Amino acid sequence: MGSSSEPRPVPAHPQSGITRRSALLGAAIGSMVLSGRHAQAQAAKPAEIKIGIATFLSGPSSVFGVPGKNAAEMLFDQLNEQGGIAGVKVRPVFVDEGPGVDHFVGEYRRLVQSEKVSMIFAGISSADCLACAPLADELKRPTLLWDCGTQRVFEEAKYDYAWRSQANATPEVLAPLLYLLKTKPNFRSVAVVNQDYAWGRDSWDIFRTGLETLKPGTRVAAELFPRFGATDFSTEVTRLLALRPDVIFTTSWGGDLDAFLRQSADRKLFERSTFVVPLAESSLERVGKTLPAGHIIGARGDHWFLHPSPRDPALLARFTEDYRKRFNAWPIYSTHHMAQAVNAMKAGYEKAIAAKGGGWPTDAELAAAFKGLTFPSLTGEVTIREDGQGLENQLVGTTLHTDKYAFPVMTDMMVMDAKMITTPVGQKSVDWLKTLKPDILDKLPAPVAYKPA
């Protein structure tokens, strides 16, 4: 067929009995069919936008899964008060990750097939993210990975419908390692206490590979992997007290981390070793000053209500005040990650709608809008790369006790640039970490001391 939409003259065929008139009629009918197919590709503007949100609502991980849910409810309310997205209100539909990955996969399918959600935010568990990214492409439903840390999702596969609105494990672990090497470089031994599942094992691989590259010869005193959900760490603490490693590294989180920190404090392990705890920001209010001053903590991004240099101080202060007023708690990193997912959703819709001249996007058009998307966070901005991975700065600091708060704050804070500490597109993290040079430490920003508000 030619490129013109006009039907071509068709001569009568003497043997088939097809006349010029019948041929033209058939062409017109075909044109109407094609026109109908084109119309079907124009998505109708919905009465509401339903967003499926997976988070931990039960179990020990709910200590930051529920704050993530709280943030979503608050932010969706605020978004709807402002008119929603292009005049359409947005409604969250929450599902619990607590029962495990098989349950989550079933819930993901239910959200798409029965609830008819327009988009899914998933999830906290790295296992759930690894499971849902292929599902996003299978079911062709735009999906934002709003909190999970595994770097494997976009290093091992490519997806058209799955994108991450925050960083992954590599910068989240590398940043505290660089901070340790810059501020306390004279350590000789290190031990790890991590939950025994993919996140615990993978994050230790990242830390150990970076350490072997930048400080070869460091002795690994112990590799301890208690079960996920453990509440008794007496065996691990006893062994660490005997081994006396200079540094104890842990990327444990939730109730597991709270218990380990309390039991370490009870037996004065903090006095023997420097702790490096990349996820400690989420535990500060719960463990209070049980966590002593002088230890290294991270925030899985540049998330901290006392951030030393937010791009929009008023935005951060307003979110913090709103969250405190509504939930009587300080916002932690999971609330920031949820805010990023909400901002990414809004920016993605707006980009896709603008590209259609105000028309409503199809699922494929909405999914494509996240490629290269830049959107605001509560402290800066995030860009989603072509491979689906979000670029997010990392904030690391040292614990400090003050009279103003009943828990440690951060001082000597460094905000590290995302591009410097994130594995480049097309490379595997462990391979890239082996190429790091010691001069990366010279590129770190100057530490900023805590200043009371």
Image (cartoon, rainbow, N blue to C red):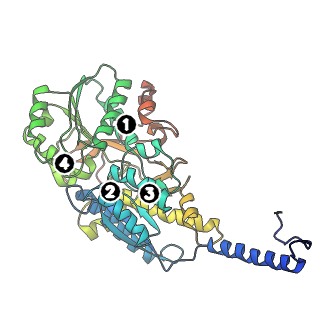
Residue 121 vertical position relative to residue 194 in the rendered view, above or below = below
Say which mark, if any, is on residue 256.
Answer: 4
Identified at 47% across, 69% down, the residue is: 118
Kind of residue indicated by mark 3: Leu
Camera-side mark, 1 or 3 = 3
Q: Earlier in the sequence, mark 3 or mark 2?
A: 3
Instruction: Tell me the quadrant of the picture where the N terminus can be found.
Output: bottom right
Residue 51's x, y, as percent?
A: 42, 68
In the rendered image, the residue lying farthest to the top is 217
Residue 212's x, y, as percent?
A: 34, 24
Number of residue marks: 4
Q: Name the residue beneath numbered marker 2.
A: 334
Callout 4 crowding tier (Cα within 10 Å): few <14, some 14–19, many ≥20: many
Q: Name the residue beneath numbered marker 3.
A: 135
Camera-side mark, 3 or 4 = 3
Residue 80 vertical position relative to residue 244 in the rendered view, above or below = below
Viewer-proximal residue, 163 or 401?
163
Q: Earlier in the sequence, mark 4 or mark 1?
A: 1
Q: CA distance from mark 4 to mark 1?
A: 22 Å
Q: Secondary structure at mark 3?
A: helix
Can residue 331 be seen here? no
In the rendered image, the residue lying farthest to the front is 15
Q: CA distance from mark 3 to mark 4?
A: 30 Å
Kind of residue indicated by mark 4: Asp
Residue 73's x, y, as percent?
A: 34, 70
Residue 265's x, y, as percent?
A: 11, 41
Callout 3 crowding tier (Cα within 10 Å): few <14, some 14–19, many ≥20: some
Camera-side mark, 4 or 1 = 4
Q: CA distance from mark 3 to mark 2?
A: 24 Å
Can residue 408 be seen here? yes
Q: CA distance from mark 1 to mark 3?
A: 30 Å
